[in-house]
Image (tube, helix red, strand yellow):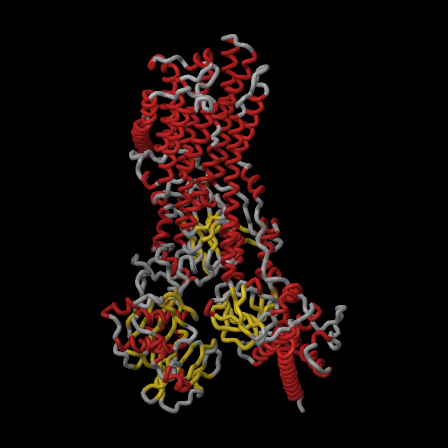
Amino acid sequence: MSSATANGTNGAAADAAATSERTSLAAVLEKAVTDREMTGIAEGVTSAAAFTVTKTQLSELGEERTRTALAKVLLDSLKEDNGAAATESASDNVVDLVETPTESASVRRGIVQLATNLQSLETETHDEHSEQAVEASQNAEVAANALTTLLLKSSPENGISPSEIAIRQDVFGSNAIADKELDSFLSLCWEAVQDFVLVWLIILGIISIVVETTVGLEDGESCGACWLEGAAILCSVCIVVLITASIDYAKQFAFIRLTRSLHETNTKSVIRDGQQVSVVDDDIVVGDILSVNSHSLASIPADCVLLGPTADLKMDESTLTGESKLISKKPGDVILSGTTAVQGSGKMVVIAVGINSVAGKIQARVYDSSDHQDDTLGDSEEESPLFVKLDMIAKQIGLVGTFCAVIAFAASCIIGLAIEGEDVDNLIDYLIVAITVLAVAVPEGLPLAVTLALAFSSNKMMKEQNLVKHLDACETMGCATTICTDKTGTLTANKMTARALYMAMKNYLCTDPSVHLADFIKTMDGGASPECLEILTALLAIDTMDETVLTFKDDSKLKEISGASGNPTEVALLTLIHELGRDYNEIRNTTRGRSNQGDLAKHLGEGKQYQFSSARKMMSWAVPHNGGYRVYTKGAAEVVLGRCHQMIDSNASAVDMDDTSSDTLVGIAESYARRGMRTLGLAYRDLPEGFDFEALSPSIKNTDGTDAFQAETDLVFVGVVGIEDPLRKDVPRAIEQCYEAGIDVRLVTGDSPNTAVSIAHQAGILRDFHFVTNDDGTPKEMVASNLKENVMMEGKAFRAKVYKTDSDGNKEFDQAVFDKIWPHLRVLARSSPDDKLTLAHGLNQSTLFTETEICRQLKTEDNISIFPDRQVVAMTGDGTNDAPALKRADIGFAMGITGTQIAKDAADIILLDDNFASIVTAAKWGRNVYCSIQKFLQFQLTVNIAAVVTALTGAFAYQKSPLAAIQLLWVNLLMDALASLALASEPPVDALLKKPPVNRTQHMITKRMWANMLGQATYQIVVVMTLLFKGPDIFDFTAGHIVEDELDENSVHYTLIFNSFVWMQLFNEVNCRNLKGEFNVFAGIEKNPIFLSILVSTSVLQVLIVQFGSIAFHVAEDGLSGKYWGISIALGAGSFPVQQCINILYRIGQHVNLVRNEGKMKKNANLTTRHAA
């Protein structure tokens, strides 16, 4: 015998032996399962010692996800308790389900042989349909059953006993991951008190109390209420801190309630005691048999190993890997937690739960390790642009206030001691005046205004589908310059829809998102013929799976679709039938050989179904027709077209297909694909009676090289359907609003370039000028290959460009190269979550705006405007691996419906409806926060300027302020607090999205605001000074300083000044609703009941204070007469005409400045011309 023959014989013998061992092991396992079902299930696992596998080993299997790892787990289970690899003398626990030593040895030998074969076959590369690949799949299926039965003590058919749950949780852990630890209320208070203004106020309040209650008292003098001002300042700090901390604390619980409500709805079907039961994800344990199918797009709650048999199960693993391609799964494969079943169905055994699962480990790291968050998740820990600016303003005001206080103290000392010769004991009074000036200068109401504005906006945003987790995220979104968005579910409806059909030589390509394809088919060029529609709808209704169904609203007379389940592509086809006015159920139920309802059900066996397979790339269904059979076929367009020799005409008659027609059809299918559509070919064939449905074609091959079914050849072409996930109807307008607001939108998706470009162009992210043109200037086809350089990039090419490798082989981010790419980049296709992180980091760190020449060149050559400051980046994400990018971005948006828990935890805002239009809403509210705080600053600083000047004047003139400290406290704290709420409640207007974002470095106080503040403050100072120095002469009453010094009474003079001062603030509060000098200051005021109610409330309080607050508020004992009330209100109302004068003068000044600049430009142009001449 030759060597080759001997080797062949030996190989065949080895194969036979392997098959025998596998068959033997399968038989023993089957018997073991039967025994367990008869005895074990009833009794259940009673101790942890029953398990010979650890949660660590199972967790490693989930991480490695290979058949080699599965083989390793099986072999490790055969080791002795001391760890020695004595596979022939295995622990009895491994085989405690078998009765005889012979059977035990057989199981051990079978496991060893099985594991060895798995490892050897895994190390070699085999064709998918080769004998080796088939053998490997068979071995993996038996190995999965062995893992389930022998190691996990479960049953593929009957599952586990409910009595075992507690033991299994003790041994393998619980599937409930502990919630993220909440920030304590005290820690939130400590965080709130770090505000610079609040620190100033605390110091000021303490100094005020100490001075007033100690050194400020003469011998024998009682303090009385002298501590009141300092205590009130500290009280205001407590109020701000408590409100801020309470809001943040409440937000945490709102997020927890949302999370728990989502958890309660997350239930899965498991087999326990032989019964299919529904349990919440948290109650699933290792050993549970999980049943999943694509009908509900089931999310896998734990790491599992797939058991056989399966029905073409395909998983979406994009939440963990970022890869949008569906992954086919076979028995023995590991199914990761957090992934989703989108096609087929199957049973799987749970191997790792909770923090031992892959997704659980990521979640635990995110929650438990602050170092991990800083390093891996890229949390930049930067303050929002708003708080950076507010800190700067607070420091500037603090310095000015300190300077004014020093001036007041020095002036009082010089005038009082040196000039008027007062006693040295008056130094304390001078110090109190200086402290009063400082108290007036510091805007006590500012922290409360910021808190109230953010809280009000966040609550309003909640009603508009934005759950704000961090208050400052509201304002940060208002400064956003770039939004990097996902596609599926955010821009699109996450609902596959038929958008194109080529049938009977007519191309029904529907490009308008608001128009249904069915309406387009019925109306274009007179519409498709009834005969064509008849054969089209019959084909689609019959050649789809029973599992794919549409549901309708019960109370809808028009049978409006309320939901769907099953294969998303088939859902799109059935929806097309419905929109064409046909009932797919009626077609199915009245077709012999297809119907399983009524009298026709007995004829169901006359039909023949060819289920879809990846080898054939098609699905067919044969039904009786005209004495023979008709086979309806749908599948990959290129495969179906390759088997067609005829096609239908406009009357649905079969005509021969020539080369020209064939080329046209291929071109149409390719054009649909270039638009990012999934293309399906539709065809049929009529067969004679008695046809052999199992007959194979000797000449036509499937894509895997096997012989095709004869019934699926020589077809009649019906049409090509283009299916895509369409845009949400409100997305194009939302994108347009972003561009109008100066916000760039970039699409970052795992989809193919053509799909990404198609959606981006429909949405308006890509415009016509992004594509190259023909020589005659006409635009080329709007597909990925026709885009200009760097407008669209694939993730792999993007990474290759922006990362450079150093001499040690380490990859390093290249900001310079990134800066050449990102101004052009609009679409990043086939991207991974790491690409999102790179994009967020690069945009955030870019200083391209400082390169004046490059920015000018980009504007001139490419019409690209670079925002004149650092980019503020908003990022959307839904997957677990999106968490780093969401943390690194200035503002992270997680999807509330499709987002994973980890993504939601990492985000700043959760989009409850997963809709891009809600991001635009967030931007509008964010800008409104900024404007609200600007309005309050305009109001507050006007008060402060006037009050400081008044206090300084009093210090110079009388060494005391005409406004008492308690009066200033009412003006500066309580009234301002109410004003902050009033101005913070101003609703946003669409005009906010008509201007560019605010620069990070731009001061919050604009020139226009300065004009308003100085103009109104000047008016108020003139009024107060007139009343102070000329009031006694004009109104014939005794001067206030004389009454208070000589008679020790509260004067009408100072009360009139106080009352007039407050009314000027109240009327100016209406002016401060506007920042741009609008002439109609009352516009829209009726739409803000909060503002009106606060304005009225403050006015009533002022009346009560003046008339009845004699002692407490240092006003005249009997208040003011009607005459003085009229004067006070008239002076207050003077703020309105003063504002109009300010507006006119400012516009005149702008015009003069414009004319002057134009004159300078003309002069420079003339000089340049003369020089050139």
**Relative to 276, does residue 880 appear above or below in the rendering?**
above
Instruction: Say which quadrant the N terminus sits in.
Output: bottom right
Determine the residue located farthest toward the left in the rendered image.
Answer: 526
Instruction: Say which quadrant the C terminus sits in.
Output: top left
Is 362 on the left-hand or right-hand side of 1000? right
Is 252 on the left-hand or right-hand side of 950? right
Residue 85's x, y, as percent? Answer: 74, 72
Q: Quadrant of residue 99?
A: bottom right
- Kindly tell me whether residue 1166 is visible in this rendering: no
Question: How many dots with numbers?
Answer: 0
Residue 143's x, y, as percent? Answer: 62, 75
Residue 351's x, y, as percent? Answer: 61, 68
**Relative to 288, does residue 861 appear above or below in the rendering?**
above
Residue 1037's x, y, as percent? Answer: 37, 13
Is 49 on the left-hand or right-hand side of 936? right
Q: Quadrant of residue 648?
A: bottom left
Question: Residue 465 versus residue 119: which sits nearer the camera?
Answer: 465
Question: Residue 803 versus residue 67: which sits nearer the camera?
Answer: 67
Question: Residue 777 versus residue 593: which sits nearer the camera?
Answer: 593
Is 763 on the left-hand or right-hand side of 278? left
Question: Residue 162 versus residue 950: which sits nearer the camera?
Answer: 162
Q: Residue at x 58, y 24 (%)?
A: 210
**Relative to 1027, does residue 94 appear above or below in the rendering?**
below
- Kindly tell me whether residue 705 is visible in this rendering: yes
